[in-house]
Image: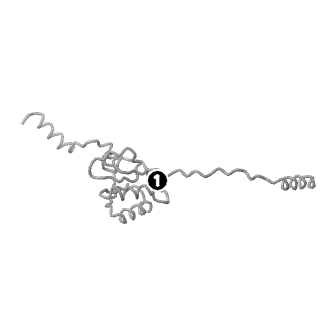
Amino acid sequence: MSNKNVDDILQQGIFGAKELKPAERKKYLGTFRERVVAVLTQGQVHEKTIYRELIKRMKTYNESTLLLNADIDYAYLKKYVDAAVENKIPYKLVMNKEAETEIGLVLAVEDAIDLEDIALTRPIIQKPVEKPKKRSFIYKIMHWVKGKTQN
């Protein structure tokens, strides 16, 4: 045995096995970024309605697992647990006391897929701009007369 192997074995015994990308795994609830299909922040999980895009991705990636941040009250997580059960997706509550993350929910697969757009957002619904009502000539005259009679 070389000294390097002995040192590695001692280090592993003292500090535990070396982890790949530990900060990334803490952020994404125990998985690597390259395996993530979709992610929601804790604030998004607290919203009343479920994200439709997440349901679509559950159906597309039916071999995925739903990872839920255990720091969030179960009342907020329940709608996502129900969606996972309905789509036959396994789910896990992940508790990490060592690190804080803004991530509330991760949909991930076993192998790397490296999707570019994993952060889900609500579609922006633009309301049509209402044009001011065109007033008739008679309305204008009546309004003018009414103003004159009140003075």
Q: Say which of 137 and 148 sits in front.
A: 137
Q: Residue at x 11, y 37 (%)?
A: 6
Q: Residue at x 53, y 50 (%)?
A: 124
Displayed quadrant of residue 59 = bottom left
Name the residue at the top extreme.
Answer: 3
Name the residue at the front extreme.
Answer: 137
Badge 1: few (under 14), some or many (20 or more) residues near its Cα, within 10 Å? some
Residue 68, how many percent across, how many down?
37, 56
Q: Say which of 99 and 67 sits in front.
A: 67
If the image is split into quadrants, where does the N terminus sit?
top left
Q: Say which of 56 and 3 sits in front.
A: 56
* Residue 129, above or below 91: above
Amino acid type at image mark 1: Gln
Displayed quadrant of residue 87 = bottom left
Left or right: 7 in relation to 96: left
Residue at the disc numbered 1 = 44
Name the residue at the left extreme.
Answer: 1
Instruction: Please tell me how many numbered marks the rendered image carries.
Output: 1
Residue 9, how many percent across, how many down?
14, 41
Colouring mode (rainbow / by chain / secondary structure / one colour): one colour
Residue 27, how many percent across, how many down?
36, 46
Badge 1 element: helix
Residue 120, how many percent across, how many down?
43, 50
